[in-house]
Image: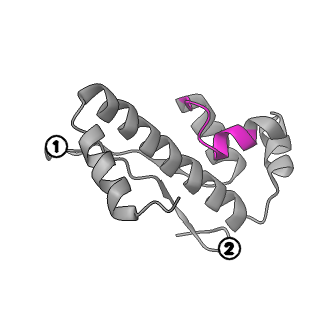
Amino acid sequence: MKVRLENVQKHLNEELRDPKFKKAYELERIKVAMAQKIAEIRDEHNLKQSELARKMKVSQQFISQVESGQNNLTLETLLKLSHSLNTSIRISFSTKPSRHACITVASDLHPGGRHK
């Protein structure tokens, strides 16, 4: 069965009308964005998951869970990641109202691991 992207988007838009679904969807969207950014930064440092895990004194499985968005990251974990990757984290809140939850995950690194 072939699923058309338009049908998926239409279905998603219908589901997003439900406040409970919308809240869960937004949380997952943010978790995935953060997970992708963490994996990207680790890759920019040419580190394997196991190497980052060793630096953080956690298991490789934990890093895998972080990078797949399976964990709700604490501020402490974000700080450990930042320190282990020799980068900084930036979390900002906007005073502008928005229909959707938004998060910007930023790293103060240039490709290759150099600070800006």
Circle 1 SS class: loop
Answer left or right for 108 relative to 64.
Answer: left
Residue at the spot 62% in from the left edge and 35% down from the top edge: 70
Q: Does the stretch in magenta take in 69? A: yes
Answer left or right for 115 relative to 112.
Answer: left
Question: Is 49 situated above or below 70?
Answer: below
Residue at the spot 46% in from the left edge and 60% down from the top edge: 3
Tell me the quarter of the picture where residue 23 sits.
Answer: top left
Q: Amino acid at mark 1?
A: Thr
* Residue 47 in the image, given as x and y percentages of width and height: 79, 59
Question: Is 22 situated above or below 86?
Answer: above
Question: Is 20 situated above or below 103?
Answer: above
Task: Tell me the tag on residue 54.
Answer: none
* Residue 63 in the image, given as x and y percentages of width and height: 74, 41
Identify the residue position indicated by label 1 in the image.
95
* Residue 85 in the image, given as x and y percentages of width and height: 69, 53
Q: Does the stretch in magenta take in 92? A: no
Q: Residue furthest left?
A: 97
The range drawn in magenta is: 63-74
Q: Residue furthest front?
A: 1
Compare residues 58 and 85 and report the one nearer the observer: 58
Of label 1 and label 2, which has the lower sequence position? 1
Few, some or many C-alpha atoms within 10 Å of disc 2 (few <14, some 14-19, many ≥20)? few
Identify the residue position indicated by label 2 in the image.
112
Circle 2 SS class: loop
Residue at the spot 33% in from the left edge and 31% down from the top edge: 21
Q: Amino acid at mark 2?
A: Gly
Compare residues 80 and 44 and report the one nearer the observer: 44
Q: Residue furthest top?
A: 20
